[in-house]
Image (cartoon, rainbow, N blue to C red):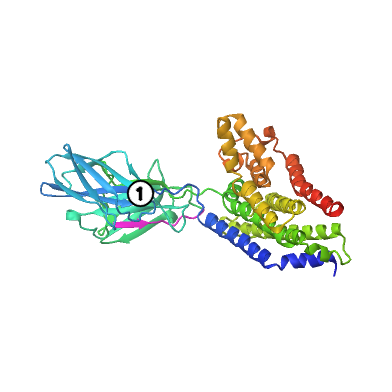
């Protein structure tokens, strides 16, 4: 069997290599699934909201508050504050989301209640701005209200709305029909009966409605109205002392078509972070286990008694190790691409896919070559293993922290050109920074520090510069190791 074939089989059947490949591909696929399946055009707020209603019994007003999240689900432990005639009343939402408070009121055509609420988030107490709720004394209950912009949990690019009904003494609704129409906003006339939806419901206090939004009516505006069981229109309470026969929902979709640029940003914020961590681990330890350990323990001397030269031995093992890195990175990116296409209906461009595979091949092979080089410098397995771990910790795991420390020590402003320059210099100094450079070239943003738009070519980030840098990182440490293997050992 030819030495190169033997070494490739030996590397690819190694338990460590198999486990690392499974980990790299599996974790990349998991991150791709999480990112793609939850991807939406806008961020979903994690902050609760509170919707208000009321009913009047004699001279007592009961304010009804429903605390809910962006999906309309109830939120507990929200403090709700009502202010009337200089007195503040407090209620706390229970597990069903309600926070009600009853207090005496004067008889007046319109009663103004000042409302706000507070909640804890990450240990901090956050208080909402105050808002005014208008109570109409002539109407003894708030009746039917529409709360728009409720996110559809089965498709977060689509919106629905919440129906809230507070009847006399807090009773739920009689039989009602909710009607949703696609409209010409200026005339309030339905564009077509194909986009009119009817929802019959009865005895509801809270209900969530998600009209069917297809690609044909994503950009249409909608309004909602209601009818009683006898077909007569019902007035909707706007919460500001007004009643209206309909409420504008506007668009019910926040969908925007996926683009290559958006797809690339999702990759850099998801699966790419796993490869940037685990590819160097694979490279460093496969280099130690298949070459460096044998070199420092003297095992290579027995291998060299066979018809193979030192140059052939280091070259075949290096190539077999690099092939394992290439396979792991390629499989991870291809499976990631398939998962993104399944959820977002777009594949990576061929050039972007090649760029990704090349990027992590450079990072992996560079760390691999460093281990090969160090194995010809140190004399013991312990020293080699310690140096390999040190390289990983300093040049990969903590590499993102080192530029921050240097910049802070030098007092460089984050808004200055020097800030960008220093970060890019550090990215060129370590193989771990190579993916940041590629990301900057593709997105026009400053690598892992993100958010700063730059002209990459102004700071020396070009296709040619990255090609030369990648080639040097892979070949220079290995060339030095090769020279030491042939002419010094």
- Helix, strand or loop status at disc 1: loop
Q: Provide residue 362's location: percent of width, then percent of height.
A: 72, 50
Coordinates of residue 225 in the picture (x, y in percent)? 32, 51
Compared across the picture, whether 472 is left or right of 182 comes to right
Q: Position of residue 310 (x, y in %)?
A: 85, 58
Left or right, 120 with respect to 261, comes to left
> Residue drawn at (75%, 49%), measured in percent from left and top?
474
Q: Height in image: 173 above or below 220?
A: below
For the stretch drawn in magenta, the main secondary structure is loop
Which of the 4 image quadrants contains residue 444?
A: top right
Q: Which residues are drawn in magenta?
A: 206-215
Compared to residue 434, the image places residue 332 above or below, namely: below
**Residue 481: horizontal and vertical position, in percent?**
79, 51
Q: Is residue 190 magenta?
A: no
Q: Which residue is farthest right?
A: 307
Residue 210 is inside the magenta segment: yes
**In this orientation, which residue lies closer to the viewer: 382 or 64?**
382
**Residue picked out by circle 1:** 48
Q: How many marks?
A: 1
Q: Is residue 250 visible?
A: yes
């Amino acid at each position: 069997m030819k030495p190169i074939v033997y070494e490739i089989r030996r590397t690819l059947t190694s338990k460590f290599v198999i486990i690392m490949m499974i980990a790299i591909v599996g974790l990349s696929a998991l991150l791709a699934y999480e990112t793609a399946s939850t991807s939406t055009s806008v961020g979903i707020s994690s902050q609760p909201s509170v919707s208000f209603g009321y009913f009047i019994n004699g001279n007592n007003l009961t304010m009804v508050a429903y605390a809910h999240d962006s999906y309309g689900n109830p939120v507990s432990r929200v403090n709700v504050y009502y202010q009337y005639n200089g007195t503040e009343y407090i209620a706390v939402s229970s597990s069903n989301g309600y926070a009600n408070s009853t207090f005496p009121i004067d008889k007046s055509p319109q009663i103004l209640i000042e409302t706000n609420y507070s909640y804890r988030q990450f240990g901090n107490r956050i208080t909402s701005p105050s808002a005014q709720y208008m109570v109409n004394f002539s109407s003894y209950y708030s009746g039917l209200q529409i709360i728009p912009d409720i996110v559809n949990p089965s498709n977060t690019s689509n919106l629905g709305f919440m129906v809230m009904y507070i009847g006399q003494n807090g009773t739920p609704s009689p039989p009602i029909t909710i009607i949703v129409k696609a409209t010409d906003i200026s005339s309030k006339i339905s564009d077509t009966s194909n986009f009119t939806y009817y929802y019959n419901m009865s005895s509801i206090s809270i209900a969530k409605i998600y009209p069917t939004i297809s690609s044909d009516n994503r950009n249409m505006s909608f309004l909602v109205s209601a009818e009683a069981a006898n077909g007569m229109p019902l007035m909707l309470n706007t919460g500001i002392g007004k009643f209206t026969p309909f409420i504008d929902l506007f668009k019910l979709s926040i969908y925007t078509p996926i683009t290559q640029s958006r797809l690339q940003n999702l990759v850099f914020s998801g699966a790419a972070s796993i490869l940037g961590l685990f590819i160097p681990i694979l490279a460093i330890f496969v280099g130690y286990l298949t070459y460096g350990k044998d070199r420092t323990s003297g095992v290579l001397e027995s291998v060299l008694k066979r018809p193979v030269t030192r140059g052939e031995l280091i070259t075949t093992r290096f190539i077999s190790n690099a092939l394992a890195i290439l396979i792991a990175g390629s499989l991870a990116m291809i499976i990631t691409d398939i998962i993104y296409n399944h959820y977002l209906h777009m594949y990576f461009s061929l050039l972007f896919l090649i760029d990704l595979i090349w990027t992590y091949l450079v990072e992996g092979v560079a760390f691999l070559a460093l281990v090969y080089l160090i194995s010809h410098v140190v004399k013991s397995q312990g020293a080699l293993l310690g140096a390999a771990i040190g390289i990983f910790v300093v040049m990969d795991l903590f590499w993102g922290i080192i530029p921050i420390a240097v910049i802070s020590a030098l007092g460089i402003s984050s808004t200055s050109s020097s800030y960008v320059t220093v970060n890019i210099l550090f990215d060129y100094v370590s193989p771990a920074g190579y993916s940041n450079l590629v990301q900057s070239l593709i997105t026009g943003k400053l690598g892992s520090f993100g958010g700063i738009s730059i002209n990459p070519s102004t700071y020396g980030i070009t296709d040619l510069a990255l090609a030369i840098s990648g080639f040097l990182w892979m070949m220079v440490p290995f060339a030095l190791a090769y020279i030491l293997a042939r002419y010094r050992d």
